Amino acid sequence: MRRGSRGFIVVAAGCALLASCTALPPPQEWGARGASEPAVPPLRPRPAANPVTRVSWADALRIARRRSPTIASATARILRSEALVREASAAAYPRLDARASYVRFIEAADFRGRTGTNVSDDTTRTRPFTGRGSDIYSAGFDVSYPIFDGGRTYYDKKAARASLQATRYDFESVVRELELRVTVAFLDVLLAEGAVEIAEETLSFTEKEEARARTRQEAGESLKVDTLRFATNASEERLALNRARSAKKIRLAILAELLDVPLPDDVKLVKPDARLDVPGQDAIAAGVRNRSEMQAVSARIKQLRHRLSREHADWWPSVDFFTSYGVLTLDEVKLSDQDDEFQVGGALAMNLFEGGATAARTAALRSEITELQGIRDELALRIEREIRESEAELDVARLNVDVSGETVALAEEVLTSVSARYREGELQVIDVTEATLQRARARLALLRSRIDLALSQARLRRAVGLEILTNQ
């Protein structure tokens, strides 16, 4: 077999060996005993929480911020951005690398070069570099330090910090959105609980009227049909009470899901006793200025501008300082002053041509900045619309509370009058039933108006970019 064929076979065998070793699991996987990674990672067990027996509006917001998986994901994004800032800052520090190599010359060539230290001499001679079967051992440390890079590292750090700032504003947006969802769920449970109380009181009133009608029937003062009508109304009101209790359980389950804590059916909900403060005439200007979404978009525009400046920095040359220390021995490993080597130097590099890649990246960044500026303008219009809608809903809610309160007072007065006249025989059962239904509707309308008022105030504060409750 020829020498060239043997060399080809050796090289091919070496490549195959390297490829097969690369395909093997790395050392950190050796202790896994061949277990393959699942396609979908299993859910992490969340720490169990004790059931909450009493919860207020502020408690619900505080628990949601502490236990919500949404907040945990947003926090992880902040940690990622902070790590990217540290990565960008690390480029300004020196880099230290360790190296080691081993070379086996199966077929060695002859080296042709100068000998001695007289570099001005033109004479050369051939001398053997290594022989067949020779070994070369080398090891050392390399240090490199960037002295000047045109501002690439500087703008990378500025862009990473702007990205971190945008991520923090995104976190605030996630918190505000979660607070609004928890607020809606909490007020829905209050509304359902109030509906249950009204249904229970209405049923109790009808059952008392049924008992009075039965007593009067036994005394011969009323007809049996009156007792049957009250009994029918009581049956219908029991159905309404069951529906109200079922609706409360469903809304309570939604709130428990948002809070990630168990809420028993008999949990005590603390009703809010004060109205929220809402911004004055400059609500739109405050919303455009304070909303975290607007601030996040502005931070991302700043990030892209730093990246654009970084692309402009590529036109400057880069200057690096490097030093290296190591040893180089033949045929055997030995450490001595004759075998060590020490290098010190600098390098200058400048990009002269890359086919227009830098210009293309610059144009892409400018287009992305223009796109984000359009998104920011559109977001400002959406914030203005949200604030105007919230202000209109708040005005209507305030009027509805006043009107509903007057309606309840009138319904109470009507029911009292109708019940008295029925006992005197001047009115029929249908009149009492209608008055009872009107009172129940009026009380539900008042309760819903109060809930809508609190929700409108919360939505307006969210639209302006404020915390829903300041003391949480």
Image (cartoon, rainbow, N blue to C red):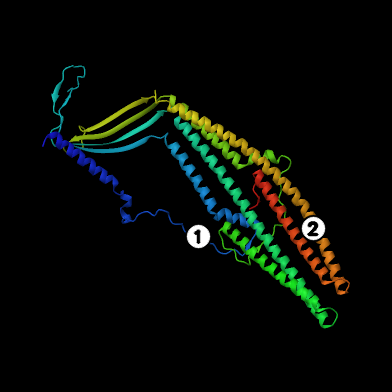
The CA distance from mark 2 to mark 1 is: 45 Å
Q: Amino acid at mark 2?
A: Gly
Mark 1 is surrounded, within 10 Å at the Cα level, by few (under 14), some (14 to 19) or many (20 or more) other residues, namely: few
Q: Nearer the viewer, residue 297 or 350?
A: 297
**Residue appearing at x 67%, y 68% in the figure:** 242
Q: Residue furthest left?
A: 1
Q: Does residue 161 sit above or below 276 in this rendering? A: above
Q: Is residue 134 visible?
A: no
Read off the residue under disc 1. Answer: 47
Taking the view exactly as shown, the residue that stands out farthest to the front is 225
- Of mark 2 and mark 1, the one earlier in the sequence is 1
Residue 124, quarter of the rendered image: top left
Quickly name the residue at label 2: 405
Q: Nearer the viewer, residue 10 or 322?
A: 10
Number of labelled discs?
A: 2
Q: Residues within 10 Å of mark 2 (few under 14, many from 20)?
A: some
The quadrant in which residue 193 appears is bottom right
| Vertical arrangement, residue 64 with respect to residue 340, above or below | below
Q: Nearer the viewer, mark 2 or mark 1?
A: 2
At label 1, which amino acid type do we have?
Answer: Pro
Residue 345 lies left or right of residue 104; in this view the side is right
Whole-percent x and y of residue 48?
51, 62
